[in-house]
Amino acid sequence: MGGEDMTAECYVITGKQRLAGAIRVSGAKNSSLPLMAAALLAEGNSVLWDIPDLADITQMRQVLENLGCRVYLHKDGSWQINAGTVSGFEVDERLMRSMRASNLILGPLVARCGQARIALPGGCAIGSRPMDQHLKGLRDMGVEIKESHGFIEAYAARLQGADIYLDVPSVGATENLMMAAVLARGTTFIHNAAREPEIVDLQNFLNKMGARVRGAGLDVIRIDGVECVHPAEHTVIPDRIEAGTHMVAAVMTQGDIELENVIPEHLEPVIAKLRQIGAMVQVEDDRVRVWHRGTIHPVDIKTMPYPGFPTDMQPQFMSLLSCAEGTSVITETIFENRFQHVDELRRMGANIKAEGRVAVIRGTEKLEGSFVETTDLRAGAALFLAALSAEDVTVLEKVTHIDRGYENLLEKYQALGAKVKRVAHGQA
């Protein structure tokens, strides 16, 4: 899965198969990417465990190698990143434009090397995700920044600690500024910081490297700058969005799925909504079991920054609520363009009316197989779930979007009893 060009491939999914069994949840993509970027801060070999095999991870590896890092994937599944060989401060434009999270190298690179030049990054077209909060915070730390022709150039002999106020609790900006502040002179405070579990995971890794960071998970993070950090070893947290997707799959297929390698506290808003819907959810230390039979009840959902309901689970729940008995309302407050899956779900018989940031979903008796197209990562997950519960066969096209966020998806679902295969376009 890691990085081949599979643009012309699609999934063929035969619906109405009850899924049952156990899935081990992979490491979190949204944690792995900043951890890989953080390895830039230290000379020597950092080791990361449970990094998922995904297209985005492959591209971040290429970004690091483009800067001169040596990156090894060992047979035991560990990743070794040697940033002692960093030889550049500019990343190939093609690599930057292919993945949004590539902007996470800006903070650690300018802190380590005193300069950085990157192209404005790409990624899923789900709405505006500007870098203004990243750049404002870096300027507060004394970084000189020039923007021109789609490039960002940053210079600083040594970053200075600062009081930084984020206008919105941006996850990427919080991570970038945390990493930059680690090597700054003095103390940095990030106010209105994002509180996601991935922020806490990054803090834990940075502190293993010798940084002095505290407050992650709260709205103010304090970073006391140090002269240098050293390589460290760390295991990535489980992917809460992957776990949430599997939980929805259990309900949509009237199934029974046990998830291994989860942190239940990270899933509390998802668990609460599933219980409202009528699902049974059993929580243990690092396991969650979800099963359901019968009616799916309607609920209203409003996406919010963590610890609220995650925007990355909104499309999957829209698929689920399309099968509910009654009317549900979803309000999307994070991204202004995150209803691109609506038209595709309608092709499958869903009754959804979307206007602005609000979608009204009137449950339908059944979804029907169709030809549908993935527009972004989580929209792809939503359509995949809809296909699992639909009558007949669904052909899901442009599945490379799904490759960006779900490791070994087909193998996991085939083991649960799903009838799904991947074929070249035109063979569906």
Image (cartoon, rainbow, N blue to C red):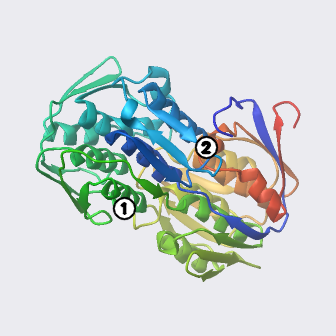
The residue shown at (49%, 71%) is 269
User: Residue 327 at x, y = what percent?
Assistant: 61, 69
Residue contact at pointers 2 and 1, CB within 8 angstroms = no
Q: Amino acid at mark 2?
A: Leu
Q: Quadrant of residue 416?
A: bottom right
Q: Amino acid at mark 1?
A: Val
Please state which of residues 329 and 222 is positioned toward the viewer in this rendering: 222
Give the numbered dot on residue 200: 1
The residue shown at (54%, 46%) is 79
- Image quarter in which the C terminus is found: top right
Answer with mark 2 or mark 1, whichever residue precedes in sequence. Answer: 2
Q: Quadrant of residue 114?
A: top left
Q: Helix or strand or loop: what does disc 1 sit on?
A: helix
Q: Is residue 248 left or right of residue 50?
A: right
Residue 332 visible in this rendered orientation of the protein: no
Q: Which residue is mark 2?
A: 54
Q: Is residue 74 left or right of residue 388?
A: left
**Is 51 rendered above or below residue 259?**
above
User: Residue 421 at x, y = what percent?
Assistant: 84, 46
Of all residues, the one furthest to the front in this rendering is: 44
Q: Residues within 10 Å of mark 1 (few under 14, many from 20)?
A: many
**Is 88 rendered above or below residue 403?**
above
**Disc 2 and disc 1: Cα gap in Å?**
22 Å
Q: Is residue 336 left or right of residue 74?
A: left
The residue shown at (47%, 74%) is 265
- Image quarter in which the N terminus is found: top right
Give the numbered dot on residue 187: none
